[in-house]
Image (tube, grey):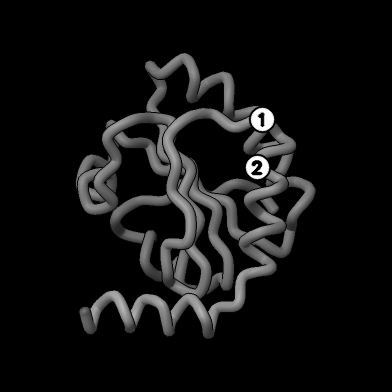
Amino acid sequence: MATIELTKENFEETVSSSDIAIIDFWASWCGPCQAFAPTFESVSDEHSDLLFGKVDTEAQQELASHFNIRSIPTLMVIRENIVVFSQPGALPKSALEEVIQKTKALDMQQVREEIAKQQAA
């Protein structure tokens, strides 16, 4: 699947239409972002069942602010509309693959129960 450019106009609809969304927050002036881009693209080609999106933090400052992005690149994973992973820094391909496998293996019922406990406290 091709990587999709995410904007404030299409973010919610696009991300909620997929069980798992892998999102790269980046900027054109960011050297580490440019270095990570080929890895992100390569992995996206190998996982056509997942949504891979990119958010240009310069053009989409509102989205970057909403997700409290303070450092780029930041990789975020959303599963069933819940942020399950968010980490700044460029990952090597093996680490990105590991994040994907761990995300797929998550027990989302357990995740929801944990969120409910935290919100109740």
Residue 24 is marked as none
Residue 62 position, x and y percent, is: 20, 47
Crowd band around label 2 with a 10 angstrom C-alpha radius: few (<14), some (14–19), many (20+): some
Is 13 above or below relative to 60? below
**Residue 118 place in picture, x, y as percent:** 29, 75
Q: Which residue is mark 1?
A: 92
Q: Residue at x 38, y 61 (%)?
A: 10
* Disc 1 secondary structure class: loop
Height in image: 70 above or below 112? above
Residue shown at 40% from the left, 43% from the top = 55
Residue placed at 72% from the left, 42% from the top? Answer: 43
In the image, farthest residue toward the right: 46
> Crowding near pointer 1: few (<14 within 10 Å), some, many (20+)?
few
Left or right: residue 9 compared with residue 25: left
Disc 2 marks a residue whose amino acid type is: Leu
- Tell me residue 70's x, y (percent): 27, 34
Estimate the x, y position of residue 30 in percent, counting from the top left: 41, 18
The mark tally for this picture is 2
Residue 20 lies in what quarter of the image?
bottom right
Tell me whether the residue at label 1 lies in contact with that at label 2, contact meaning CB atoms closer than 8 angstroms: yes
- Would you identify the image quadrant in which residue 91 lies? top right
Q: Secondary structure at mark 2?
A: helix
Q: In the picture, which quadrant includes the C terminus?
A: bottom left
Front-lying residue, 10 or 43: 43
Residue at mark 2: 96
Q: Nearer the viewer, residue 26 or 97?
A: 97
Is residue 17 placed above or below 95 in the rendered structure?
below
Q: Amino acid at mark 1?
A: Pro
Cα–Cα gap, marks 1 and 2: 6 Å
